[in-house]
Amino acid sequence: MSESNTAGTILLVDPDPKVAQSILSFLESRHYSVLWVDDGEKAYNQLDERPFDVLITELSAHRIDGMRLMAVARDRNPEICVILIAEQPDVERAVEAMRCGAYDFQTKPLNLGKLEAVIQRGISQQRLVLEKHELERRLDERYGLGSLIGKSRQMIKIYESVRQIAPSRATVLIQGETGTGKDLVAQAIHNNSPRKMEPFVKLNCANLPEALVESELFGHVAGAFTGAIQSRKGRFELADKGTLFLDEIGELSPGLQSKLLRVLEHQQFERLGDSKTITVDVRLIAATNRPLERMVQEGTFRSDLFYRLNVVTIDMPPLRHRKEDIPLLAQHFLKEACAQNGKHIEGITRGAMDLLIRYNWPGNVRELKNIIEGMVVRAHGRQALDAHDVPDHVRQSIQPEAGEIRIPTGVTMAEVERIVIEETMRICGYNKEACAKTLGIGLRTLYRKLKEYDIR
């Protein structure tokens, strides 16, 4: 049974195979998807690998106890329904467990009917919270969080962080790989802050020669250096009363790191070539794709600046860790690309979407956006983007799973044939003779099919 057709996903932690089997059989008969492990360390690993709606664990689970597992599970999914089980009544531990976030506390022997009722309530409450977040996301998309798109748990945590952080004056450090949307989060924080009617000014520290970065930050007066014909305001002045977003802050030289620290501490600076001190009121949001903490240890980034920036941190997840958001993102970028290029493409086929979901996305959301736009530009007279519109490097980098060919539901027989031929070619290392032999067809037939489906 696929997880999409279940009443919920459950991680069961119990060292007793007989007890676990009775719980597992009962819950599976009620259409729950249950994974059983016999100790806390195995449960810990599973919580890192996949999401669960419910955690049922022995309070005294071996290696990692139930209280610690609950903390880990709630960190991965704050709304998870945690049910702790003890061998005998322990009122003090039960109170502590409920205070720490457990949904229920039960003792053995279990009443399975009562257990299921608790699970149903917990999952219902969890879904109500997720629906609330989705409604807030739609409202934010229209009124505040701009181009941030996604309904994964990782993105829900980002939305919550933005709402909590935005009203404050705190400096924010956004960390994440290139292309994850750090600039969009910075814009969302500004849009939801009391400064939203004031300027939002950006500077990418990696895109400018070091000699120009200081002028860009603090401005200069006429004659300050060769080519400075007239005075110019820097980004700090332009952002006065508003927000300054410094992207790739890890690229700043040690000298500029020192000057930036002074501005953050005193909100004062001088333009290049001038002795007049300028006072500003600027909120700083910084972003980096480099490990600043490690750079501090290596001596390439000032520790005092790091601690001044690291007041509030947001970690942007790579796209490969939130693949459930790919369909939403792909449809959004499809709509954008069609509008920009005068195309009328209604959607993306299941076959194409399956390939996009299985790809690892080293370039993250930015790469997805560029690929969708390229697919739209190259498409001619089609109602939907199909699997053969997906670029070769994407299709060829996807590894087959356990030697099997995945066929998405809802595709046409022609699409099925194309997918089978394409996947078999990949498995055979693009050796056409081996592919034809594996498929049980003649080599001429294979060549005709490759041309028909534009498989290269």
Image (tube, rainbow, N blue to C red):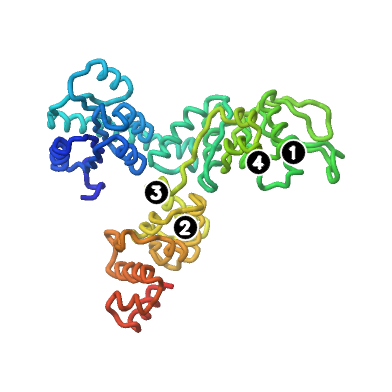
- 3D distance between C-alphas at marks 1 and 3: 40 Å
The residue that appears at 34% across and 75% down in the rendered structure is 435
Residue, disc 4: 203
* As drawn, 237 above or below 369: above
Q: Quadrant of residue 41?
A: top left
Judge the density around disc 1: few (<14), some (14-19), many (≥20) Cα neighbours within 10 Å: many
Q: Going by the image, does 85 lie left or right of 298?
A: left
Residue 66 is tagged as none
Give the number of the mark in front: 4 or 3. 3
Label located before the other in sequence (1 or 4): 4
Tell me the element at label 1.
helix
Q: Mark 4: few, some, or many residues within 10 Å (few <14, many ≥20)?
A: some
**Furthest residue in direction front, as rendered:** 63
Q: State left or right for residue 172 relative to residue 121.
A: right
The residue that appears at 44% across and 43% down in the rendered structure is 149
Using the image as rendered, state which of residue 305 and residue 395 is in the foreground: 305
Q: What residue type is disc 2 on? A: Ile
Disc 3 element: helix
Q: Nearer the viewer, residue 276 or 49?
A: 49
* Disc number for residue 214: 1
- In primary-sequence order, the first of circles 2 and 4 is 4
Residue 305's place in the image compared with 24, above or below, is above
Say whether disc 1 or disc 3 marks the residue closer to the N-terminus. 1
On residue 372, which mark appears? 2
The residue beneath circle 3 is: 323
Q: Earlier in the sequence, mark 2 or mark 3?
A: 3
* Residue count near mark 2 (Cα–Cα under 10 Å), binned few <14, some 14–19, many ≥20: many
